[in-house]
Image: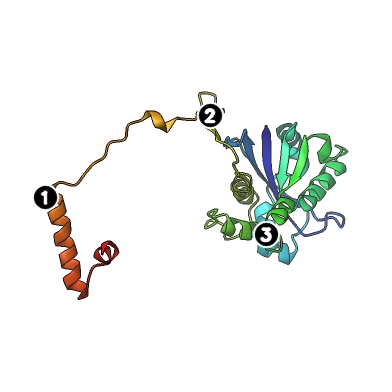
Amino acid sequence: MRQLFFDTETTGLSAENGDRIVEIGLVEMVDRRLTGDDRHWYLNPGRASHPDALRVHGLSDEFLADKPRFEHIADELLQYLAGAELLIHNAAFDIGFLDAELQRLGRGRTADFVAGVVDTLGMAREMFPGKSASLDALCKRLEVDRSARTLHGALLDAGLLAQVYIRLTRGQDSLVIEVGNERGSGTFAAEAVDLRRFVLPVLRASDEEIAAHEAVLDALDEACKGRAVWRQALA
């Protein structure tokens, strides 16, 4: 299965009121393995970012001024998305912006190009009811390193989401374990082993080893001014 972890940064919160995408990040995973064949674009939105949005992503109007507009990368983006499953944290937000960009170009909707959309925010809320389900909170809870995240960035956040998703879905109820092979995918089924057919050796301490052990216990007795707990247990 080909899955794409998708994130955007935008000029504001409302695609309906004309806010635009300023950054797109996509991280590819095939058969639960990150491929490294990712995509990342900064985009000129043709309008200023809201101050609150600028504080989140830090992408100034001056920085974005010479970047391509969405219509210039649309074909490459749609070709990359084709047939994949999209995984997005708070999918309604990002899909709303992507749909708005596509509709400006008369290119339909995101659902026309992908196999489906999974909202990892909903997954996290089901798995951790009553607890924060933000990406930062999930990274902390699932021990995903986010030390490089000083500002929000679409590609960085897509990569963090991929790591979070792997941990959210790594539950195992069988001995079938995924391993790599020459083609980069595969499974290995652990074979049951009858331990009764093995003769286990019994190693006994020599007289010298026993004497050395007693010397250590004597030293502990002297250090703690009492009887060592090992000797108390054997008494």
Label 3 vs label 1, nearer the camera: 1
The picture places residue 147, in percent across and down from the top left corner, at: 52, 58
Label 2 environment density (alpha carbons within 10 Å; few <14, some 14–19, many ≥20): few
Q: Amino acid at mark 3?
A: Ser
Label 3 environment density (alpha carbons within 10 Å; few <14, some 14–19, many ≥20): some
* Residue drawn at (59%, 56%) of the image: 139
Q: Residue at the far bottom: name it.
A: 225
What label sits on residue 134 in the rendered view?
A: 3
What label sits on residue 208 in the rendered view?
A: 1
Q: Residue at the far front: name it.
A: 235
Mark 2 — residue?
Answer: 188
Coloring applied to the structure: rainbow
Q: Residue at the far top: name it.
A: 182
Helix, strand or loop status at disc 3: loop
Q: Amino acid at mark 1?
A: Glu
Left or right of residue 190, residue 214 in this image: left
Above or below, comparing residue 46 to residue 117 in the picture: below
In the image shown, does 167 or 36 lie closer to the viewer?
167
Q: Amino acid at mark 2?
A: Phe
Left or right of residue 74, residue 151 in this image: left
The picture places residue 206, in percent across and down from the top left corner, at: 15, 46
